[in-house]
Amino acid sequence: MKSQGLRHYLSLILLFMPPLLFAVLLVAFKDHPKLQHTQMPALSWQFWILALAGLVATAGGVLDWRYHRNPLNMKIPKKERDAEAAALGLGGLPMFVLMWLAMMSDKPTWYLIPILVVLIYTVVAICYDEFVFHIKRCRPRENLYHRMLVFGNGIAWLSWFHFIFIR
């Protein structure tokens, strides 16, 4: 029973892991030379966009999670929960680790190929979830939550990618 309860919250827990880890690591490594533009008030524009888009994505994820806990709305089948957890856990968390390592590295391009491989997996996992489970049955409100989650995370990732590889 307890493992089923944890599985019920797994996607919500995984949703909060990247922003919480990001905040903790920024504080823990605040004096690192690679993070000189990540402290207030000299926060780089990429981090402002990352924070705003990340908030939109997290809000969309929480709203979608809550939407499916309402007995009047359709419950998420186990296969769909597993697909979402795979996208978050096998795509999102490894992506976070690779992006953090690249940001802290003197040679971030060493991480470029693994980041792109994980990106491709994550996009495929998200598309699988959207096209197999959501395309025909989602209502407009649920579609809005999904768009907030997917596009918010995409914009946050692009902003972080720009900070690491372009600036």
Image: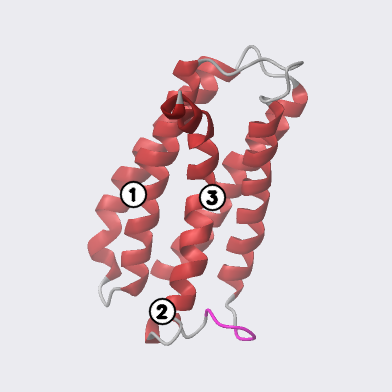
Q: Is residue 166 visible?
A: no
State whether the magenta stretch is mostly helix, strand or loop: loop
The amino acid sitting under disc 1 is Pro
Residue 102 point in image, percent of width and height:
32, 66
Among the 4 quarters of the image, the one containing residue 117:
top left
Report which residue position mark 3 lands on.
16
The amino acid sitting under disc 2 is Phe
Q: Is residue 136 visible?
A: yes
> Which residue sits at x=37%, y=70%?
103
The amino acid sitting under disc 3 is Phe
> Which residue sits at x=39%, y=68%?
165
Disc with the residue nearer the chain's start (3 vs 2): 3
- For the magenta stretch, what is the residue range? 38-42
Residue 109 point in image, percent of width and height:
27, 65
Q: Is residue 60 above or below residue 75?
A: below
The furthest residue to the top: 136
Report which residue position mark 1 lands on.
94
Q: Residues within 10 Å of mark 2 (few under 14, many from 20)?
A: few
Q: Nearer the viewer, mark 1 or mark 3?
A: 3
Q: Is residue 63 above or below residue 52?
A: above
Instruction: Specify the color scheme.
Output: secondary structure
| Cα separation between marks 1 and 2 | 20 Å
Q: Is residue 48 left or right of residue 30?
A: right
Secondary-structure class at tag 3: helix
Numbered mark located on residue 29 in the image: 2
Disc with the residue nearer the chain's start (1 vs 3): 3
Secondary-structure class at tag 1: helix
